[in-house]
Amino acid sequence: MSFTLATWNINSVRLRMPLVEHFLERYQPDVLCLQETKCPDDLFPFKPLHRLGYGHIAIHGQKGYHGVATISRRPLEIVEKRRFCEIDDSRHLSVKLEAGSRQILLHNFYVPAGGDEPDPEINVKFRHKLDFVEEMRAIRAEQDDASASILVGDLNIAPLEHDVWSHKQLLKVVSHTPVETTNFEAMREAGEWVDLMRHNVPDEQKIYTWWSYRARDWDVSDRGRRLDHVWSSSNLVPHFSGYEILREARGWERPSDHVPVIARFDL
């Protein structure tokens, strides 16, 4: 059977609900993981999602900041809303669902951006980001014959040289500094996660999922970064059939600066 999963930093779910509805109507993923929903749980827009057939929704939100939501056609069991760095931010949500004959443990993450100054001694936001990534080592890719794990979200780090438009120019820019990229990859490997977006894609091939609002013409300048990720346990790799980065969504009316990433599995 086919199983399709999408991840998207929506940058305010209520503001961009028409875009979410358009995306779901057109692409119809089984599951959509949203980040930066910026919405308290009691104000989350359930009704339009239910009308589109997404009757199973898990949320972890807060007023005005952060927030994650997992929207599904399939029943969901909420597993955990983990607290990181002793801060009550809504940045993580894990659920379980059935896909084919497997039970999938699905993590939805929104990693802190880290501010503008890449020095943890003078920038508490950057210190928070580094500490958050370190704590993510505890999130491991659990798997056995009947179960598997997926981790998606806006992880706010572009780890590889060609995950950014200019490796040299961004070495001192938050999201691509050596301390971030080294710790990020060490965390991924410690958890035994497979980076599916780089699976069978050469490291020298550019991959972007985010284009800054500051760019006068984002499409022409193409100064992107790969900040959004799809990882899985190793037992899902043979069932991974590819992914699509919906670049056109960056040009939609009142868009997010991130675009959806759609991953497909044959289970």
Image (spheres, rainbow, N blue to C red):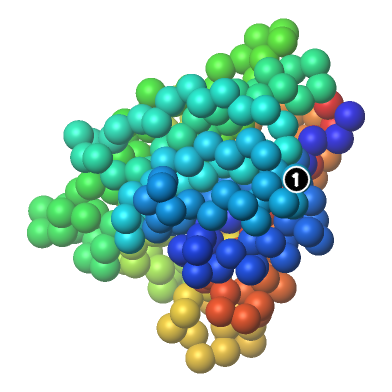
Q: Residue at x 55, y 68 (%)?
A: 16
The x and y percentages for residue 6 are: 67, 48
Q: Position of residue 86 (x, y in %)?
A: 20, 34
The residue nearer to you, when weighing 51 against 157, is: 51
For the N terminus, the quadrant is: top right
Relative side of 243 to 194, left or right: right
Residue at image position (73%, 56%) is 24
Q: Which residue is mark 1?
A: 53
Q: Position of residue 111 (x, y in %)?
A: 39, 47
Q: Is residue 202 above or below residue 15?
A: above
What's the residue at 66%, 78% (across, down)?
Answer: 252
Q: Amino acid at mark 1?
A: Gly
In which quadrant will I find the C terminus? Answer: top right
| Residue 227 to residue 217: above or below | above
Q: Which residue is at the far left? A: 122
Residue at 78%, 59% (x, y): give it. 25
Report the front residue among 172 and 39: 39
For residue 194, say whether it is visible.
no
Q: Can you say whether 39 is above or below 168 in the image?
A: above
Which quadrant of the view contains residue 149?
top right
Asked which quadrant contains residue 137, the reply is top left
Horizontal side of residue 10 vs 89, given as left or right: right
Using the rendered image of the protein, determine whether residue 98 is visible from the camera's viewpoint. yes
Label 1: few (<14), some (14–19) or many (≥20) C-alpha neighbours in 10 Å: some
Determine whether the residue tagged by mark 1 lies in a helix, strand or loop.
loop
